[in-house]
Structure formats: structure tokens, C-alpha cells
Amino acid sequence: MTGLPDYAAPLRAVDLLDVRACGDDLELVAQITVDGKEPNLRGHFPGQAVYPGIFVIETLEQAMREAANARLRTVRSVRFLAPVLDGDRMVLTATAKRTEDGWDVTGTAALGETTTAKIRATFEEDAE
């Protein structure tokens, strides 16, 4: 058990992650193919599964945990620009700049040439 309630399935928000070090900074590319049959998407929305905006942020969170053992501290800004639907392959590219106490991260999620979200966030080292 992961500490989640029995009814809450863990969210798989990253299928593939590519991380490149650029000095002290990181470049990340995270991909997820939306599966409308996932337990977390049932009913969101009936007849047309939509990947919720908070899940886009979770994609960045899971990528940073894997790449830098860092957890989300603050979402500084986020703009959701287009829906991500069942069957879509979302690609989130991000640059993580090392700071004294963590990371400043800027990311863009897209479906091909269509930008779906822009995120600016800060992450801190995960003490666990």
C-alpha cells in the first residue's frame, strides 16, 4: 500500500522520461498517453475523457521526482490553453534551473504543435 486510501489508484502521469544535464541545470521531456479507462479519469467527463489540468502539473511533479528527487513547493503560474483528451500523447518539456534551495522550473505541455499548458513552479529537495 502506498499510503493512499483503498479507493484511490495511484496516478501514472509519465510514460516516458528523458533527462539531460546542462551544467547544474536539467532539461526534461516527459510523455504520457491519456487512457480514458484509467480509474482517475472515469467520469471526467462522461463520453469524452479529459486529462485534468492538475494532472498536467502532476506530470511535471513525477518527472522532477524521478529526475532530481525534488517535490513541488509552489506553482508560480499555470495557464491551460487546450484540452488533452483520451488517446492524446502529451509531451511536457521543461527546464529546471538549480537554485540555492531547490529548482526553478519552466515547462510547456503540447500535443504536436498545439500548446496545451504553460507552467512555472519551484521545487525543493525531497527529504524522504
Image (spheres, rainbow, N blue to C red):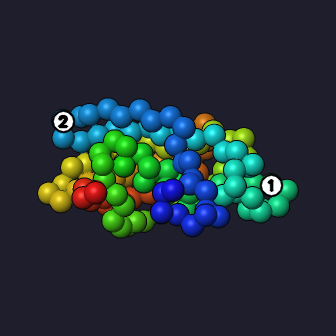
Q: Is residue 111 something that shows in the picture?
A: yes
Q: Which mark is residue 40?
A: none
Q: CA distance from mark 2 to mark 1?
A: 43 Å
Q: Which residue is mark 2?
A: 23
Name the residue furthest front: 1
> Viewer-proximal residue, 65 or 53?
65
Q: Is residue 126 left or right of residue 109?
A: left
- At horizontal 36% and vertical 61% (from top left) the residue drawn is 72
Rate crowding at label 2 as few (under 14), some (14 to 19) or many (20 or more) other CA atoms within 10 Å: few
Q: Is residue 44 left or right of residue 58?
A: right
Res 52 → quadrant: bottom right
Q: Position of residue 67 (x, y in %)?
A: 34, 41
- At horizontal 31% and vertical 60% (from top left) the residue drawn is 122
- Measured along the vertical axis of the image, is residue 17 above or below residue 51? above
Which mark sits nearer the N-terminus, 2 or 1?
2
Question: Identity of the amino acid at label 1?
Answer: Gln
Q: Is residue 16 left or right of residue 28?
A: right
- At horizontal 45% and vertical 35% (from top left) the residue drawn is 17
> Viewer-proximal residue, 103 or 108?
103
- Label 1 sits on a secondary structure element that is loop
Q: Which residue is mark 1?
A: 48
- Label 2 sits on a secondary structure element that is loop
Rate crowding at label 1 as few (under 14), some (14 to 19) or many (20 or more) other CA atoms within 10 Å: few
Asked whether the residues under the numbered discs 2 and 1 touch, taking CB atoms below 8 Å apart as contact, a structural biologist would say no
Q: Position of residue 5 (x, y in %)?
A: 57, 67
- Measured along the vertical axis of the image, is residue 19 above or below residue 99? above
